[in-house]
Image (cartoon, rainbow, N blue to C red):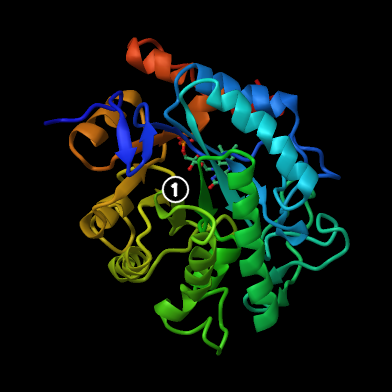
């Protein structure tokens, strides 16, 4: 039987009304001092739910004070931040949409001016090249984490995940992609540690693995999505030398922990990898029978084919959900999809 993007989808006891996902997108509209979200943000997510999104994955949410990489980033580590998210989950749950909180720590992609005077942290004291978003200063050289600091961050992930579940989220996504802290551990370029967190792929995946182990204590395993990528925000040329080996190591570790959802991130879905003739999603599908999310500049007819041909189980749209809050209605009615215009549309939240 072929499936449609409009048919429902079950991940054990989690039922999505359809296969259409709103991809995580940082918008920067939270209170910069307190990291609290507001009614405007609740309305923004609520609107996408009202028009029928199956699953919303929120913008990256800071798990601690040191996790932020730019202005206006929401947090989920204080009591007040956590309470405020309830506005969002309540708004979204008026409809049948499910919502996951994306848990984020930027590691070295930050600056003390964003981090209330603290230097950024990373697996190794290696600076990133590039500039801090909106601050427009170079990324600051990070401090290398001690093992006890690593375990503190792992605890922070568990606490943030617990807060997310207590404030009504249906699940969480761990942001292990795009060159942020977890990815800084995974990448051999930013991680030159000589302890159990550095060296082999398995060691470099250990930080993510320990986070998963902790988070599973507070979130059911079918409600945890893991986002990974080859792409690094601070290094446009970075590629995996052996993509199949990476994908195999990642899926093996996630299977061991009975994780159910992988969300590999690429800019253009289906493009061949530089060091493999297949695309990232093709490689993941080879090793992953559980839920796979497709994403990356996907147009409507492609989305339909992805699900029908079982290339992936769910299809995420990012920018098109900004320009079309009613994207699901438009897709169903085969109506025109409005293009995304970066400058104007990122300035406001509607
Ligand atoms: C404004 C904007 C903010 C983004 N913020 C995040 C983020 O917080 N976390 C994340 O994992 N990806 C983030 N992304 C990447 C998107 O989730 C998505 O993978 C990307 O936009 C490709 O999908 P699209 O072509 O459908 O937009 C962001 C993308 C955009 C355009």
Give neighbour class at mark 1: few <14, some 14-19, many 20+ (Cα, 10 Å).
many
**Coordinates of residue 348 in the picture (x, y in percent):** 70, 24
The residue furthest left is 1
**Coordinates of residue 161 in the picture (x, y in percent):** 59, 53
Q: Which residue is mark 1?
A: 223
Q: Is residue 54 visible?
A: yes
Residue found 51% across the figure and 40% down from its top: 170
What is the quadrant of the C terminus in the image? top right
Above or below 97: residue 227: below
Above or below 69: residue 240: below
Residue found 34% across the figure and 31% down from its top: 19
What is the quadrant of the N terminus in the image? top left
Place residue 32 in its image quadrant.
Answer: top right
In front of the other: 51 or 95: 95
- Image position of 54 (left or right of 143): left
**Coordinates of residue 183 in the picture (x, y in percent):** 53, 64
- Image position of 179 (left or right of 284): right
Above or below 248: residue 345: above
Label 1 CB sits under 8 Å from any ligand 1 atom: no
In front of the other: 125 or 213: 213
């Amino acid at each position: 039987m072929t499936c449609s993007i409009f048919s429902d989808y079950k991940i054990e006891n989690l039922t999505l009304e359809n296969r259409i996902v709103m991809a995580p997108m940082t918008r920067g509209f939270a209170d910069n001092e307190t990291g609290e979200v507001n009614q405007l943000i609740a309305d923004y997510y609520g609107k996408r739910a009202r028009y029928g999104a199956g699953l919303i994955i929120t913008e990256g949410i800071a798990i601690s004070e040191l996790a932020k990489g730019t202005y206006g980033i929401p947090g989920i580590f204080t009591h007040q931040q956590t309470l405020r998210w309830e506005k969002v989950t309540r708004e979204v749950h008026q409809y049948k949409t499910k919502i996951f909180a994306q848990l984020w720590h930027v590691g070295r992609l930050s600056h003390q001016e964003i981090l209330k005077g603290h230097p950024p942290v990373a697996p190794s004291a290696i600076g990133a090249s590039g500039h801090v978003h909106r601050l427009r200063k170079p990324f600051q050289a990070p401090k290398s984490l001690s093992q006890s600091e690593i375990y503190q961050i792992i605890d922070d992930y568990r606490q943030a995940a617990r807060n997310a579940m207590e404030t009504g989220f249906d699940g969480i996504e761990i942001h292990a992609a795009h060159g942020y802290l977890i990815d800084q551990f995974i990448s051999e370029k930013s991680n030159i540690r000589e302890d159990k967190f550095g060296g082999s792929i398995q060691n470099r995946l250990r930080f993510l693995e320990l986070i998963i182990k902790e988070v599973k204590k507070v979130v059911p395993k079918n409600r945890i999505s893991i986002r990974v990528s080859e792409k690094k925000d601070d290094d446009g040329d970075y590629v995996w030398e052996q993509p199949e080996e990476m994908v195999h190591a990642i899926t093996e570790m996630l299977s061991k922990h009975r994780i159910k959802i992988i969300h590999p991130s690429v800019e253009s879905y289906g493009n061949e990898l530089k060091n493999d003739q297949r695309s990232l999603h093709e490689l993941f599908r080879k090793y992953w029978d559980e839920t796979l999310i497709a994403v990356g500049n996907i147009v409507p007819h492609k989305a339909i084919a992805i699900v029908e041909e079982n290339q992936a189980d769910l299809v995420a749209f990012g920018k098109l959900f900004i320009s079309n809050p009613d994207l699901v209605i438009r897709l169903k009615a085969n109506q025109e999809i409005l293009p995304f215009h970066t400058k104007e549309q990122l300035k406001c939240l509607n």
